[in-house]
Image: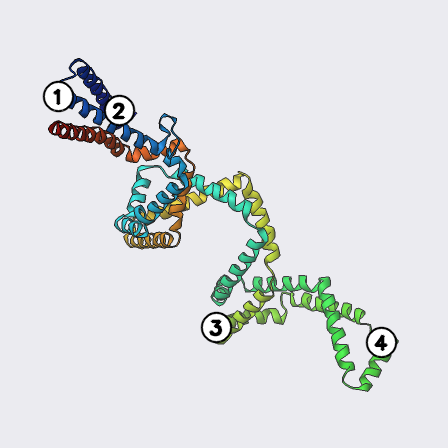
Amino acid sequence: MRAGKRRANMVLTCAAGMFAAALTLKFYYPGSWLASIFLTVTEASLAGGVADWFAVTAFFRKPLGFSYHTALVPRNRKRIIDALSAAVERDFLSKQAIKGRLSQANLLEKIMTYAQRNDVRAGVRSAIDKLLAEVAETLDPSAAARYGERVLKLALRRQSVVPHLAAIIGWALAEGKGSDVYKAIMDELAEVVRRDKTRDTIYDYLKDLKQNTARKNWLSAVVTGFLESIDGINLKDAAIVLQKELIDIIDELMEEEHPVRLWFQSELKHILEKLTTDEWEEAVNDWKNGQLTRMNLAVPLTVLAESVLAALKQPSGYRLALADWLTEQTLHCWQQFQTNGSLQLQAEEYLKTLLFTISEQEHYLVGLMARRALQKLSDEDLNAFIEDKAGDDLDWVRINGVVVGGVAGLGLALIKLFIQ
């Protein structure tokens, strides 16, 4: 029991005891005017104390089981919760109050002080591990691949390949690797021309060429049709022959003393010089952008994303290693941040701006959270909550009732005495 409530009960008990004493005196001294005054005072004091006890108790419960307009707090539970929630939202934690407190607070200093006093490594490591698991469970691999393709292509388009190409050529010339570069190019060409897809491409080209030739005039159409009917033009055989010719040409170009090979090695120096011109740089970058446009990276990136996300879903060695690496990078960045005063000022300003924006746009959540917290309280818990905040004042109301009742009784007794 609270000290205030215990004090009020003691005062009411004293008033009852004094009333009993006054009755006793009146019984033994019925003609005494002092006994009459004392009885009137104690009677009024007890009546005032009982009335205020009843009134205060009726706020929260049913005193003596009396149910008429009692238990006001449980009866008006919804209105009280709405009023308290509104008071919290509009008065105690209004937008202006929140902004004022945030403006005066040094949020970043408090965060840095907490980080210095506590070992945050374990917390950061646990948070990163949980984040990786959640990302693996919720992220769509195809969506991640599409986004990764856009980002990768955008980065490659912004990056000029000419400086890198010039560096490679310069290195090849300095190391005497011109012949190796030529061999690598020829090996790639040899592999390409030996593919079945190359023969199909040659066949499609010959087919288009035949159709374009037949359309020129009626005589070309007649001759082409006649030759095809007697198997004079067999496009498939022609494609095979041409592919073999290409293979033979590439094989010849790969000979050590072939003129083209010797020319290529000497021409590398001129190519390196030309790469420094705007015309060549523009041409090379246009070629690069064209390749990027035709290139489809979504499929391989989807496969890669599926593999990575599958590894991240379980606490595998890969996920643990990635979490450790991210933890180290995060703590390293945090250490650098602690020594950068200008960056701290920017972060403090950004953090306050963010919180101001949230408090402005989502301020209704203050009242909503207060309402939900109050709604979880039972009737007794709500009574205890209000009594804890206003109980002392209510106890003094009861004490004042006893005192004021006694004073009023004294006044009435004196008036009665003078009238008689």
Query: Considering depth in this image, is 151 or 355 the residue closer to the camera?
Result: 355
Numbered tag placed on residue 9 in the rendering:
2
Query: Considering depth in this image, is 399 or 54 the residue closer to the camera?
Result: 54
Question: Tag 3 or tag 4, which sits nearer the N-term?
Answer: 4
Identify the image quadrant of residue 408.
Answer: top left
Q: Classify 221 as above or below 144.
A: below
Secondary structure beneath dot 3 equals helix
| Mark 4 vs 3: CB contact within 8 A | no
Secondary structure beneath dot 4 equals helix
Q: Nearer the viewer, mark 1 or mark 3?
A: 1
Residue at 32% in and 47% down: 93
List x then y, in percent, for residue 263.
58, 72
Q: Is residue 244 left or right of residue 22?
A: right
List x then y, in percent, for residue 145.
57, 55
| Mark 1 vs 3: CB contact within 8 A | no
Q: Nearer the viewer, mark 2 or mark 3?
A: 2
Residue type, label 4: Glu
Question: Tag 4 or tag 1, which sits nearer the N-term?
Answer: 1
Query: Considering depth in this image, is 312 or 113 the residue closer to the camera?
Result: 113
Q: Is residue 366 left or right of residue 413?
A: right
Question: Tag 1 or tag 2, which sits nearer the N-term?
Answer: 2
Q: Is residue 287 left or right of residue 53?
A: right
Secondary structure beneath dot 1 equals helix
**Residue at the top extreme?**
28
Question: Tag 3 or tag 2, which sits nearer the N-term?
Answer: 2
Q: Residues within 10 Å of mark 4 (few under 14, many from 20)?
A: few
Residue, disc 3:
273
Q: Classify 322 as above or below 59.
A: below
